[in-house]
Image: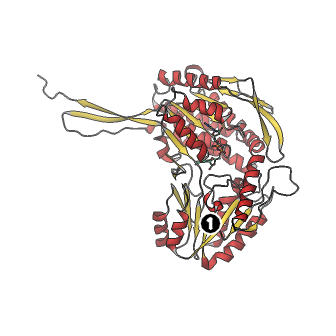
């Protein structure tokens, strides 16, 4: 059974069934601050049930018994089902998350792309043969890890869910997804899309569960469950560190996609129009709630004043329902809004210059924060070092190239970095000097689902997206065979 449209109460999808629980969580529209729906709050018993079913499914071998091309076909069918519900899903995602309709639609279409991309790889997971002379035959095979537990944040719930789910399914795993408390509704449509393609029901019952509940409760129980084989976590650094400690008891392998404080380095030969478009996307898209947001900008002193003024004009020009590519949208919750505003106040008390913003949007019911620009930021200030996760950018001047790289690398994070220049040699020096999992040149968020993504330092480890991600969801097994070369 799938969940009906226009509903106000949602269930969890546990091992092929849509389940209610005793309690529920309320879902609030960030644009109006009104509660508009509820979802069952899964219990630890529900989480255990999902893992038990996934374990049985993974151990039965049903997900890998056929030619991998069958898995590819299933993935393509899921992708088409996601495309078919993209419009309905996008509207729901706007309601629970506050993002623009265009961005929500893109999120569903990106989710479909993940299934197409990894569907195309499902029949190409090939091992290699290792020559050891005539006395041996040696080869490697990639086997699914088994039961993959995936914990998803609220900023791009549909995209991030598909980002981990698609490669895991392509590799033949059973998956239990824990959705975020604030935005779990649109994600349930991914279960609908999989169910419609036949995954998780009948012989493959248990291959997929998507359930919502309190993170410190069912999230922690999923991580601690000894029957799982992997944790894929996308979220904040403190939660990630907590999960790593929890997973250590069973030595459960983890993929960690954590936060960022990423810097764009801007030189005087920059194409200014191109750069300002990147700033609009880089820090104000999705109200800045992007792990790889351009939250720091380092500008050469020769163009510093001019760039600060241009970014302030850009920030002041953003509006709600502007019809522009980047709209002013609310942040996800009252708590998030208060946290961002408190960080802005703290920045001012530490001596940062507030150029524009720094307040809640006046006369708005929802959780809006004015697009905010700080200048004269020193590297020892909290606003330079800590993730805000809101529409807040900090601008710092630099004199020399060496100083720019040192500032860019001078936080505990290492998710992405960027350089804006038309000098090819400088670009090459930048790509070597910047310590990050991905370096953008002359366009923030360049790349796509095909390009590997992940962090260094406190930004995490393991890679999502691209071909690399598939290998986060398999174990390498080596088979070493002794050949008897004396037949008689
Ligand atoms: P969060 O850490 O608060 O929560 C993430 C998920 O973890 C939620 O589903 C939550 O319920 C669950 N959780 C909470 N406590 C848990 C526990 N003890 N055990 C298991 N699960 C638990 O993060 P958030 O506020 O939802 O997301 C914002 C953060 O995510 C930011 O720091 C952002 O940078 C990061 N993020 C990273 C990426 C990436 O790809 N690197 C992408 C998106 C967001």
Residue 333 visible to the viewer: no
Rendered residue at 61%/46% (across/down): 236
* Residue sitting at x 64%, y 75%: 304
Residue 14, position as x, y percentages in the image: 64, 25
Residue at 83% in and 45% down = 33
Q: Nearer the viewer, residue 462 or 63?
A: 462
Binning the other alpha carbons within 10 Å of mark 1 as few (below 14), some (14 to 19) or many (20 upward) gives: many
Q: Secondary structure at mark 1?
A: strand
Q: Position of residue 238 (x, y in %)?
A: 60, 45
Identify the residue position indicated by label 1 in the image.
Answer: 297
Q: Is residue 355 visible?
A: yes
Q: Is residue 15 left or right of residue 118?
A: right
Residue 222 lies, with reference to residue 373, above or below; the image says: above
Residue 383 is left or right of residue 328, and the answer is: left
Q: Give the percent coordinates (x, y) of residue 151.
A: 60, 37
287 lies above or below 19: below
Q: Is residue 311 left or right of residue 78?
A: right
Which residue is at the far bottom?
302
Question: How is the model colour-coded?
Answer: secondary structure
Q: Is the residue indicated by label 1 positioned so its CB lies within 8 Å of ligand 1?
A: no
* Ligand 1 image position (quadrant): top right
**Location of residue 264 by image quarter:** bottom right
């Amino acid at each position: 059974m799938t969940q009906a449209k226009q509903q106000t109460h949602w269930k969890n999808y546990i091992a092929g069934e849509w389940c209610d629980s005793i309690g529920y969580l309320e879902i609030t529209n960030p644009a109006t601050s009104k509660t508009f729906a509820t979802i069952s709050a899964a219990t630890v018993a529900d989480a255990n049930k999902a893992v038990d079913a996934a374990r049985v499914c993974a151990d039965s071998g049903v997900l890998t018994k056929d030619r991998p091309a069958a898995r590819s076909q299933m993935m393509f069918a899921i992708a088409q089902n996601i495309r078919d519900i993209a419009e309905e899903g996008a509207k729901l995602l706007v309601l629970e998350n506050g993002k623009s309709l265009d961005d929500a639609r893109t999120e569903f279409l990106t989710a479909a792309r993940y299934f197409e991309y990894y569907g195309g790889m499902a029949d190409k997971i090939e091992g290699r043969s290792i020559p050891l002379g005539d006395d041996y035959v040696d080869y490697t095979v990639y086997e699914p890890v088994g039961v993959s537990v995936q914990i998803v944040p609220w900023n791009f719930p549909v995209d991030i869910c598909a980002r981990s789910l698609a490669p895991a399914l392509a590799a033949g795993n059973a998956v239990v997804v824990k959705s975020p408390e604030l935005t779990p509704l649109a994600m349930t449509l991914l279960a609908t899309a999989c169910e419609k393609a036949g995954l998780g029901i009948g012989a493959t019952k248990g291959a997929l569960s998507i359930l919502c509940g309190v993170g410190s409760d069912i999230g922690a129980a999923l991580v601690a469950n000894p029957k799982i084989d992997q944790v894929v976590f996308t979220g904040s650094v403190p939660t990630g560190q907590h999960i790593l400690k929890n997973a250590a008891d069973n030595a459960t392998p983890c993929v960690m996609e954590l936060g960022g404080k990423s810097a764009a380095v801007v030189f005087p030969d920059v194409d200014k129009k191109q750069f300002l478009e990147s700033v609009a996307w880089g820090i104000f898209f999705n109200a800045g709630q992007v792990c790889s947001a351009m939250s720091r900008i380092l500008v050469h002193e020769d163009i510093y004043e001019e760039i600060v003024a241009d970014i302030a004009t850009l920030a002041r020009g953003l509006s709600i329902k502007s019809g522009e590519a980047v709209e002013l949208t609310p942040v996800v919750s009252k708590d998030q809004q208060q946290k961002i505003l408190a960080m802005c106040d703290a920045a001012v008390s530490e001596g940062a210059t507030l150029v524009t913003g720094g307040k809640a949007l006046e006369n708005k019911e929802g959780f809006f924060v004015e697009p905010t620009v700080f200048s004269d930021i020193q590297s020892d200030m909290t606003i330079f070092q800590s993730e805000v996760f809101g529409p807040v950018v900090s601008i710092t001047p630099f004199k020399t190239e060496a100083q720019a790289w040192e500032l860019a690398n001078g936080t505990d994070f290492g998710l992405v970095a960027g350089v804006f220049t038309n000098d090819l040699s400088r670009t090459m020096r930048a790509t070597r000097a910047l310590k990050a999992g991905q370096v953008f040149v002359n366009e923030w968020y360049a790349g796509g689902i095909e390009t590997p993504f992940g962090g260094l330092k406190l930004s995490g480890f393991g890679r999502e997206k691209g071909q690399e991600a598939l290998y986060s969801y398999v174990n390498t097994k080596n088979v070493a065979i002794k050949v008897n070369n004396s037949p008689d």
